[in-house]
Image: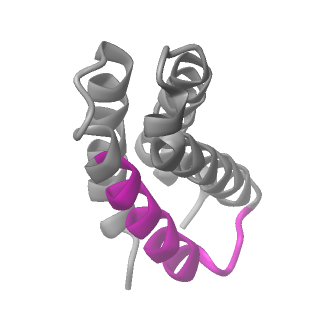
């Protein structure tokens, strides 16, 4: 599949990466940062895998299915953790993560 055929998922990956980075930064500024540790860790993991998959799709990786499967799993875990918190940034991140997980699942063979 060519790079052009991945435009929707690439855009969704980028949006998720951005939401996770924002959530990560905002969580570090929360009063009780200790309660946000799992959210912060998963934000970082999710942003990293989304960024990697975005780049890999752009260059035509032969590992689309494998990477998309891992990305979907991490996005779901991040979304599940973020939705536990009432902060607006966490809720927006959860939404972006679930949307991204759904797009990634479409790429799994």
Q: Is residue 41 above or below residue 35?
A: below
Image-quadrant location for residue 24? top right
Q: Residue at x 41, y 41 (%)?
A: 8
Q: Nearer the viewer, residue 6 or 30?
A: 30
Q: Position of residue 86 (x, y in %)?
A: 22, 23
Residue 18 position in % (x across, y down):
56, 26
Check the image and report above or below for 2 versus 97.
Answer: below
Report the magenta stretch's main SS: helix
Q: How many marks?
A: 0
Whether residue 106 appears in magenta in the rendering, the answer is no
Q: Is residue 62 above or below residue 68?
A: below
Q: Quadrant of residue 83?
A: top left
Horizontal arrangement in the rendering, residue 35 relative to residue 40 (left or right): left
Q: Is residue 98 above or below residue 34?
A: below
Where residue 51 sits in the image (x, y, percent)? 67, 46
Q: Is residue 93 left or right of residue 50?
A: left
Q: Report the residue at 30% width, 18% height from top.
A: 87
x, y percent for residue 88: 29, 14
Image quadrant containing the N terminus? bottom right
Figure colour scheme: one colour
57 sits left or right of 27 in the view: right
Q: Quadrant of the C terminus?
A: bottom left
Magenta stretch contains residue 77: yes
Q: Which residues are magenta?
A: 60-79
Left or right of residue 43, residue 88 in this image: left
Residue in the picture at 47% in, 23% down: 32
């Amino acid at each position: 599949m060519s790079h052009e055929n991945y435009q929707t998922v690439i855009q969704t990956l980028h949006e998720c990466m951005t939401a996770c980075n924002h959530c990560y930064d905002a969580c570090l500024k929360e009063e009780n940062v200790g309660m946000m540790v799992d959210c912060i860790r998963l934000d970082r993991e999710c942003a990293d895998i989304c960024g990697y998959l975005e780049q890999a799709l752009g260059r035509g990786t032969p590992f689309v299915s494998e990477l998309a499967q891992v990305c979907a799993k991490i996005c779901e875990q991040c979304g599940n953790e973020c939705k536990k918190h009432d902060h607006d940034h966490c809720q927006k991140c959860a939404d972006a993560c679930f949307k991204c997980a759904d797009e990634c699942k479409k790429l799994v063979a």
